[in-house]
Image (tube, rainbow, N blue to C red):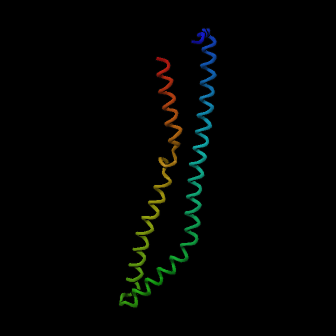
C-alpha cells in the first residue's frame, strides 16, 4: 500500500478552484462548439430553402399554367380551372412552409448536449459536497 498524502485545507481549496475553472473552460468550449454546429445547420437549411425556391418558382408557375389549361380543355371555365389549381398549390405550399418553420424552431437549435453535460456536472458536484 502507498503512503497517504495529507493535504492542507488551502491546498484542497486551491485544487478545487483549479478543477472548477478547468471544468468551466471545458464546458464553455463544448457549448461554443455545439452552438456553432447548430448555427451552421440552420444556415445550411435556410440556404437550401432559398436555392430551392429560386429554382422551383419558375418551374411551378409553368406547371400550374399547364394544369389550368388542361382543366380548361376538360370543360372547366378558365376562372374555375385557375381557382382549382391555385387552391391546390396554396395548400401544398402552406404545408411545405409549416414543415420548414418547424425545423427552424428554437427547440431544434438548443445545445442539448451541453445542457445535459452541465446538469450531469452539477449533480456530480452536489454528490461530492455531501
Taking the view exactly as shown, the residue that stands out farthest to the front is: 1
**What percent of the width, then of the height, locates residue 80?**
37, 83
Query: Which image quadrant is residue 18 in?
Result: top right
Is 23 situated above or below 29? above
Is 95 situated above or below 32? below
Which residue is more in the foreground, 104 or 15?
A: 15
| 128 lies left or right of 91 | right
**What percent of the width, then of the height, locates residue 73?**
40, 91
Residue at point 50%, 42% (across, down): 112
Is 94 situated above or below 13? below
Residue at point 64%, 16% (across, down): 14
Which residue is more in the foreground, 29 or 2?
A: 2
Query: Which image quadrant is residue 55 in?
Result: bottom right
Which residue is more in the foreground, 52 or 57?
A: 52
**What percent of the width, then of the height, locates residue 22?**
63, 28
Residue at point 51%, 44% (across, down): 110
Taking the view exactly as shown, the residue that stands out farthest to the left is: 75
Residue at point 57%, 12% (across, down): 1
Count up the numbered dots.
Answer: 0
**What percent of the width, then of the height, locates residue 66?**
47, 84
Amino acid at each position: 500500500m502507498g503512503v497517504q498524502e495529507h493535504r492542507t485545507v488551502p491546498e484542497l481549496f486551491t485544487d478545487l478552484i483549479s478543477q472548477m475553472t478547468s471544468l468551466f473552460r471545458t464546458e464553455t468550449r463544448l457549448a461554443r462548439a455545439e452552438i456553432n454546429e447548430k448555427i451552421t445547420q440552420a444556415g445550411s437549411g435556410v440556404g437550401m430553402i432559398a436555392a430551392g425556391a429560386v429554382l422551383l418558382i419558375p418551374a411551378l408557375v409553368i406547371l400550374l399554367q399547364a394544369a389550368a389549361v388542361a382543366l380548361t380543355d376538360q370543360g372547366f371555365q378558365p376562372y374555375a380551372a385557375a381557382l382549382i389549381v391555385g387552391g391546390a398549390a396554396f395548400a401544398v405550399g402552406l404545408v411545405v412552409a409549416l414543415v420548414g418553420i418547424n425545423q427552424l424552431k428554437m427547440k431544434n437549435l438548443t445545445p442539448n448536449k451541453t445542457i445535459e453535460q452541465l446538469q450531469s456536472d452539477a449533480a456530480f458536484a452536489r454528490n461530492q459536497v455531501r
